[in-house]
C-alpha cells in the first residue's frame, strides 16, 4: 500500500484535528518524525498522543490488533513524561531533548511474546498461565528509555510459530486493508495497529519472517536486522539463533528512526535547529536528498522450498517484482538476474524444506508446555514431528544448514543486494490456515511465505518494501536481502523505492 505520506517533499505539520479531536484518530496524518517534533516543540503533549492511540485501539477493536491495552499505565507514564519535558525545556535545546529521547511521546505496543513490566504476558497461548513481569525485557527497556509509551500488548499466534495471527485467547488479528483477511504473523497485531493508524511505529521480532510477512500483508516497511546486529539480541552465530528484532512502519524514514533506537545508535544533531538523527535515519535522509552510489542488484524468483513444495506466484507478486526492478533502475541501480549461480542450476541448497522443518520444530524444546492437549493443533503437530524425528536426523539437518549459513554472504555472489518476491499469494481469509489439517496448514504457510525463512537461516538482514497495490486495494511487496551490517543501506533503498512511486 502506498500511503500519501510516501509522497516526496516535506510532510505537513500534524493538524489539530488529529491530536485533540479524538474522533479523528490516525497516526498516518504525519510521520513519526513529525509527531515527535510536535511533542518536543510543545504543539502536542505526550498525554494527547497516548490518549489518541488508546482511543483508536478502542475504536478499532474489530481489527484484533491488541491482546491487552492498559490505559491507566500508559497515561501515567505519559503524564510523567510531560512533567519532565516542561522542566527540560528550561535548560535544553529541542535537539538535545530529541537526542536524549528520540521516541519522545510516541505510543507503541509490544508483542505478547515480549515481557513488559506491569503488563500480562501470555505468549498467545491458552496453555500458558498469564504472568505479569516485574521488569521490561531488554528490547522494551531500550524503547521505553527512548521516550516511547507502551499502550498495550499486540496480538500474536501461539508462541509466535505460525505466519498468521490467530489464537484461542483473543479475537484474531485482521488486516486493515481487508478485515476479512489475515494481517500475517507473528507480528500481525503490531502490523495491523500501524497500518490502521493506531500506532505510528511498532517493534516486532522475526524468526522466520515475522516482521516482514505482516509488513507485506499490510503494506508496510518491515526490517529484519542481521544476526547479532542489535545489542539486545542473541549474538550467537548458530543457525538455531533465528530470532532478531526489527521495526515496522509506514515509511522507511520512520522504520529507520525506530531501528536506530533498537540498534543503540547515539543520536546527535549538527545544527541546533534540527532534530537529532542517528545512523540509519541520517543515511535515509542523505539518500533521499543526495542519492546513493549505483548498486548491483540481483533478482531471483526461485524459492528455497522448491521443488519439495509447488511454489506458484500470484500474478500480482510478479507485478511487484517488475515494479521493484523498475524503481531501482530509475534510481540508477544496476539490476540483473541470477544466472551466475555457483556452477549449478539451483540457486538455493538442496532439501531446504526438510531441513528447515527440522530446525523450526526443534525450537519447541524451549517452549514451556505442560499439557499438550491445551495447545493449538498446529503446535501439537510440531511437537509430534519433533518427537518422531531421531536426534541424528535433527543434528544432520542443523549441520547442513549451519554450513549454508556460515557461507551466507556467498549467496549474494557479485551483488550488493538480492531482490526476491515476498509473499506467494494474497493474505488468505481469517481462519483459512487453521481450517486445514496441521500438515496442510504448515505447507500452505510455506507456500504463502516462500522467501522469508531462508534469510533467518543465513543470518543476513532483509527488508520488505511495498511497491504495488492491486485492483482490490491489497498491497504487494518485494524483499531486499543485504550483506551483514547493511541495514542502513536497505532502509535507504526502501526510501528511494517508495519515493519513486508513480
Image: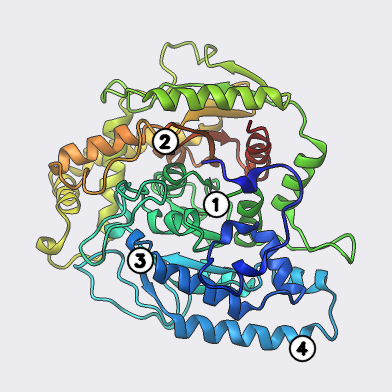
Q: Nearer the viewer, residue 360 or 211?
A: 211
Specify which label sits upstream in the sequence, 4 or 2: 4
Distance in Å between CA atoms under marks 1 and 3: 36 Å
Marks 4/2: CA–CA distance: 49 Å
Dot 2 or dot 1: first in sequence order is 1
- The mark lying in front, picked from 4 and 2, is 4
459 to the left or right of 88: left
Say which quarter of the image contains residue 441. top left
Q: Quadrant of residue 337?
A: top right
Mark 1 secondary-structure assignment: loop
Mark 2 vs mark 1, foreground winner is 2
Q: For mark 1, does the 10 Å Cα neighbourhood hold few (<14), some (14 to 19), or many (20 or more) residues? A: many
As drawn, 221 above or below 264: above
Q: CA distance from mark 1 to mark 4?
A: 38 Å
Q: Position of residue 172 (x, y in %)?
A: 28, 58
CA–CA distance in space, label 2 to label 1: 16 Å
User: Can you identify the residue that label 2 sits on?
Assistant: 454
**Pair 2/3: label in front:** 3
Q: Nearer the viewer, mark 1 or mark 4?
A: 4
Disc 3 crowd, CA 10 A, few/some/many (<14, 14-19, 20+):
few
- Residue 8's place in the image compared with 377, above or below, is above
Residue topped by disc 3 = 61
> What kind of element bears circle 4?
helix
Q: Which mark is residue 87?
A: 4
Q: Which mark is residue 488?
A: none
Amino acid at each position: 500500500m502506498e500511503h500519501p505520506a510516501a509522497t516526496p517533499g516535506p510532510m505537513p505539520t500534524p493538524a489539530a484535528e488529529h491530536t485533540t479531536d479524538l474522533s479523528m484518530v490516525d497516526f498516518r496524518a504525519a510521520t513519526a518524525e513529525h509527531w515527535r517534533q510536535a511533542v518536543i516543540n510543545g504543539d502536542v503533549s505526550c498525554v494527547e498522543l497516548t490518549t489518541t492511540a488508546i482511543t483508536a485501539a478502542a475504536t478499532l477493536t474489530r481489527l484484533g490488533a491488541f491482546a491487552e491495552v492498559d490505559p491507566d499505565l500508559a497515561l501515567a507514564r505519559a503524564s510523567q513524561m510531560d512533567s519532565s519535558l516542561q522542566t527540560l525545556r528550561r535548560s535544553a535545546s529541542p535537539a538535545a531533548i530529541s537526542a536524549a529521547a528520540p521516541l519522545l511521546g510516541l505510543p507503541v505496543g509490544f508483542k505478547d511474546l515480549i515481557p513488559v513490566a506491569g503488563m500480562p504476558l501470555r505468549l498467545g497461548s491458552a496453555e500458558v498461565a498469564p504472568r505479569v513481569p516485574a521488569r521490561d525485557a531488554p528490547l522494551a527497556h531500550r524503547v521505553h528509555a527512548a521516550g516511547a509509551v507502551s499502550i498495550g500488548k499486540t496480538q500474536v499466534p501461539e508462541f509466535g510459530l505460525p505466519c498468521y495471527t490467530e489464537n484461542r485467547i483473543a479475537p484474531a488479528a485482521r488486516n486493515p486493508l481487508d478485515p476479512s483477511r489475515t494481517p500475517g504473523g507473528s507480528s500481525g497485531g503490531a502490523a495491523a495497529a500501524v497500518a490502521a493508524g493506531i500506532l505510528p511505529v511498532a517493534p516486532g521480532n522475526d524468526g522466520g519472517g515475522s516482521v516482514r510477512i505482516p509488513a507485506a500483508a499490510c503494506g508496510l516497511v518491515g526490517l529484519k536486522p542481521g544476526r547479532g546486529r542489535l545489542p539486545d539480541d542473541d549474538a550467537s552465530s548458530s543457525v538455531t539463533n533465528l530470532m532478531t528484532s526489527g521495526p515496522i512502519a509506514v515509511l522507511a524514514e520512520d522504520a529507520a528512526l525506530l531501528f536506530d533506537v533498537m540498534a543503540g545508535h547515539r543520536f546527535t544533531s549538527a545544527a541546533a535547529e534540527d532534530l537529532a538523527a542517528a545512523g540509519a535515519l541520517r543515511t535515509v535522509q542523505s539518500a533521499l536528498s543526495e542519492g546513493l552510489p549505483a548498486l548491483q542488484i540481483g533478482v531471483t524468483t526461485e524459492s528455497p522450498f522448491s521443488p519439495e513444495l509447488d511454489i506458484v506466484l500470484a500474478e500480482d507478486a510478479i507485478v511487484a517484482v517488475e515494479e521493484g526492478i523498475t524503481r531501482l533502475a530509475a534510481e540508477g541501480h544496476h539490476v540483473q538476474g541470477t544466472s551466475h549461480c555457483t556452477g549449478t542450476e539451483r540457486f538455493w541448497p538442496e532439501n531446504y524444506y526438510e531441513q528447515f522443518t527440522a530446525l523450526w520444530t526443534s525450537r519447541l524444546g524451549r517452549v514451556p508446555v505442560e499439557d499438550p492437549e491445551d495447545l493449538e493443533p498446529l503446535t501439537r503437530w510440531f511437537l509430534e514431528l519433533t518427537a518422531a524425528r531421531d536426534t541424528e536426523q535433527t543434528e544432520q539437518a542443523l549441520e547442513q544448514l549451519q554450513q549454508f549459513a556460515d557461507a551466507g554472504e556467498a549467496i549474494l555472489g557479485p551483488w550488493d543486494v538480492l531482490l526476491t518476491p515476498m509473499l506467494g499469494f494474497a493474505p488468505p481469509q481469517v481462519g483459512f490456515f487453521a481450517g486445514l489439517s496441521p500438515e496442510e496448514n504448515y505447507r500452505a504457510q510455506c507456500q504463502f511465505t516462500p522467501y522469508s525463512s531462508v534469510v533467518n537461516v543465513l543470518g543476513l538482514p532483509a527488508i520488505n518494501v511495498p511497491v504495488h497495490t492491486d485492483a482490490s486495494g491489497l498491497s504487494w511487496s518485494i524483499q531486499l536481502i543485504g550483506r551483514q551490517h547493511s541495514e542502513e543501506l536497505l532502509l535507504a533503498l526502501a526510501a528511494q523505492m517508495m519515493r519513486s512511486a508513480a
